Image: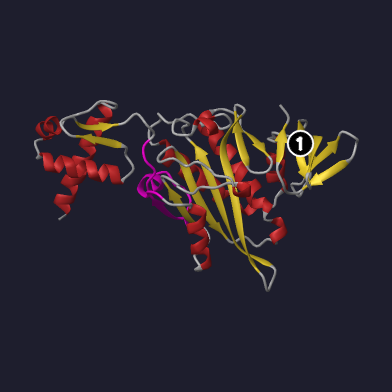
């Protein structure tokens, strides 16, 4: 059995090496079979194994197999190769309505912290205020993390802000481009939104305590599959041609989130968040009741309230709502 497994592993590795050597071009099954001295059925099995491990290999009748120029598919095995934190339970699904919905259901069933649900596609992805978050297949990274922090419901905004700092750090490491944060949950790169964060909490009504929180993160790796309407305001981190990039970024992000989780409420996270503020100093508008108010953002308070000054000199602290930058 061991000899057979070793032979199968060797076949997979050699097939992958050949496909990498001719990346972006089709390689016939006949060529691979002749080169390796094995059957075409064995080649097909090796390709299926590679696909299951996250490699984006296109199969076409009469043409053969091609390792695409894209960043590969997200997979559990693919992420685990680069994951340097223990205690993370990851499930990667092909297509779901919303990873947040699945993680919330798991939370209600008693799943432990660091249960992570990721998907290659979301058909019902959403952002704050019920907005749609486009999540086309294999176009980005869509994941939700179940957390059970010992904080009050009033402090739950810190989950979003700490995640924003982690996302910025990881994207900057991979791209070399500085990221900014638009209060409270959007990550911008080169003046375009590349990531959205949605934290949803479950409150114990009797105790008034936070039972669990689900941290949802969506990162656009490419903008090619986004609608033309969304592309007007959203961009991508632009690494779709990098090898295995979705698995690498997902692993790096989960590692970062877990490694700084103990700093959730810290001054350091607040300082990092504030230093990347996209809004401080900007002229903005916001809704107060039915009225649209013009103001300038002057600061971000320690509880992550946004301090604005209206045109008549009134200072207001906003702890919720939507702020739009004036053109």
Q: Is residue 233 magenta?
A: no
Residue 151 as seen in the image, left or right of residue 70: right
Outermost residue, bottom side: 206
Residue drawn 55% across the image and 47% down it: 126
What percent of the width, then of the height, locates residue 190?
60, 26
Dividing the picture into quarters, in which one does residue 48 lie?
A: top left
| Image quarter in which the C terminus is found | top right
What percent of the width, then of the height, locates residue 70?
37, 31
Q: Nearer the viewer, residue 117 or 250?
A: 117
What percent of the width, then of the height, locates residue 128?
62, 47
In the rendered view, tell whether residue 251 sits above or below residue 311. below
The residue under label 1 is 285
Q: Which residues are magenta?
A: 72-95
Marks counted in the figure total 1
Mark 1 Cα within 10 Å, few/some/many (few <14, many 20+)?
many
Q: Nearer the viewer, residue 46 or 58?
A: 58
């Amino acid at each position: 059995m061991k000899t057979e497994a070793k032979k199968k592993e060797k076949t997979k590795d050699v097939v992958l090496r050949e496909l990498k050597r001719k990346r972006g071009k089709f390689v016939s099954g006949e060529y691979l079979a002749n080169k390796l001295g094995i059957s075409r059925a064995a080649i097909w099995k090796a390709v299926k194994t590679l696909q299951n491990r996250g490699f984006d290999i296109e199969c076409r009748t009469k043409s053969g197999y091609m390792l695409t120029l894209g960043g590969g598919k997200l997979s559990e095995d693919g992420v685990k190769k680069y994951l340097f934190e223990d205690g993370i339970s990851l499930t990667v699904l092909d297509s779901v309505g919303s990873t947040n919905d699945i993680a919330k259901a798991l939370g209600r069933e008693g799943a432990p912290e660091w249960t992570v649900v990721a998907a290659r596609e979301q058909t019902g992805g959403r952002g704050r205020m019920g907005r749609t978050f486009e999540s086309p297949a294999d176009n980005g990274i869509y994941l939700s993390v179940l957390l059970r922090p010992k904080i009050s419901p009033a402090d739950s905004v810190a989950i979003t802000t700490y995640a924003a700092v982690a996302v910025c750090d990881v994207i900057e490491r991979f791209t070399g481009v500085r990221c900014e944060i638009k209060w409270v949950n959007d990550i911008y790169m080169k003046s375009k939104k590349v990531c959205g964060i949605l934290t949803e909490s479950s409150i114990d009504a009797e105790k008034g305590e936070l039972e669990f929180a689900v941290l949802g993160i969506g990162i656009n790796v490419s903008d090619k599959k986004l609608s033309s309407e969304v592309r007007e305001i959203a961009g991508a981190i632009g690494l779709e041609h990098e090898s295995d990039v979705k698995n690498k970024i997902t692993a790096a992000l989960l590692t970062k989130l877990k490694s700084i989780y103990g700093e959730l409420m810290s001054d350091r996270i607040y300082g990092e968040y504030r230093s990347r503020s996209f809004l401080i100093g900007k002229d903005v508008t916001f809704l107060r009741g039915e009225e649209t108010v013009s103001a300038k953002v002057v600061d971000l308070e320690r509880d992550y309230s946004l301090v604005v000054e209206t045109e008549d000199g009134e200072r207001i602290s906003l702890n919720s709502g939507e702020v739009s930058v004036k053109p």
